[in-house]
Image (cartoon, rainbow, N blue to C red):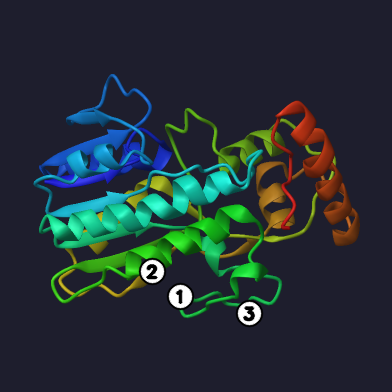
Amino acid sequence: MILVTGASGFMGRHIVAALHARGKAVRALDILPWPECPVPLIRGDITDNQVLQRAVQGVRAVIHLAAISNLWTRNRRDHDTVNAYPTGRLAAWARAVGAERFVYISSYATLLSADTPDPVTEAQDPPLDALAGSYPRAKRGGEALAARERAANFQVTTLLPAMPLGPGDISMTAPTRLVRDLAARRLPALLETRLNMIDVRDLAQAVITALDHPQPAHRYILGGHEVMLSQFAALIDPERQLPRVPYPLAYFTAMIEEGLVARLTGRPPAAPSPA
């Protein structure tokens, strides 16, 4: 039995479908409903210890995706509460019940800082305070907590997916919104940055490969070739050339939008600040 947490999300649905198609016994866990889920679904909150303990009973492996995927929350501690701490508890309980594998879906963003060299590799480990915001910091925290449970008979593998794109993104994750906004010409300007993307179906197959590999490494990047945002925008809308926003202006705007507008209205900022 393989437990998949965060199963009803964009990546989770594709992973569950890929496992199910291969005839694997799968148990899904998510706080949100999924009426068409092809496998048994436990509805529950990842922060509820009783839910976690019930979910891991009888499993041989765990694929842990459940998280707040938004880069911004009104309370930055929410990222730690949901994305970091339950990861360590889930890994510990999985090992305690005799599971053999724990595959943690972290984020490519945990490798990125202002000083990140090119190309990015799994060996990079920027300081926690150099990461751009509470989301990657909490994900890095989850990595560390899960790694504590690594033992001779309990393999912990961390996967670091880049921006997933593909069919079925009903919740409109940030990469999909970017494509939509570029295609609809909703963006007035660009802050030039590097992008790395992966087809969500390739991501699902990579997760299964990590699960089945006899001797997996501790960390893998799941991504493709890096492109600049301006190059990506030109692929989507070659007839439009967007002006570039200087980084200091973009940073100042993000600080104002997050620090004042977003916290007053509750609406997420277009670009969260890295503070």
Q: Amino acid at mark 1?
A: Glu
Residue at (57, 53) in percent of width and height: 135
Q: Secondary structure at mark 3?
A: loop
Residue under numbered circle 2: 220
Cα–Cα span, label 2 and label 3: 17 Å
- The reply to whether dot 1 and dot 2 touch (C-beta < 8 Å) is yes
Classify mark 3: residues with Cα within 10 Å, few (<14), some (14-19) or many (20+): few
Residue 246 screen position, x and y as percent: 89, 59
User: Label 1, label 3: how many angstroms apart (C-alpha)?
Assistant: 12 Å
Q: Is residue 123 above or below residue 190?
A: below
Query: Which of pointers 1 and 2 lies earlier in the amino acid sequence?
Result: 1
Res. 205 visible in picture: no
Q: Is residue 5 left or right of residue 182?
A: left
Q: Are marks 1 and 3 in contact (CB under 8 Å)?
A: no
Q: Which residue is mark 1?
A: 122
The image quarter containing residue 41 is top left
According to the picture, the residue beneath numbered tag 3 turns out to be 117
As drawn, is 56 to the left or to the right of 135? left
N-terminal of the pair, mark 1 or mark 3, is 3
Q: Amino acid at mark 3?
A: Pro
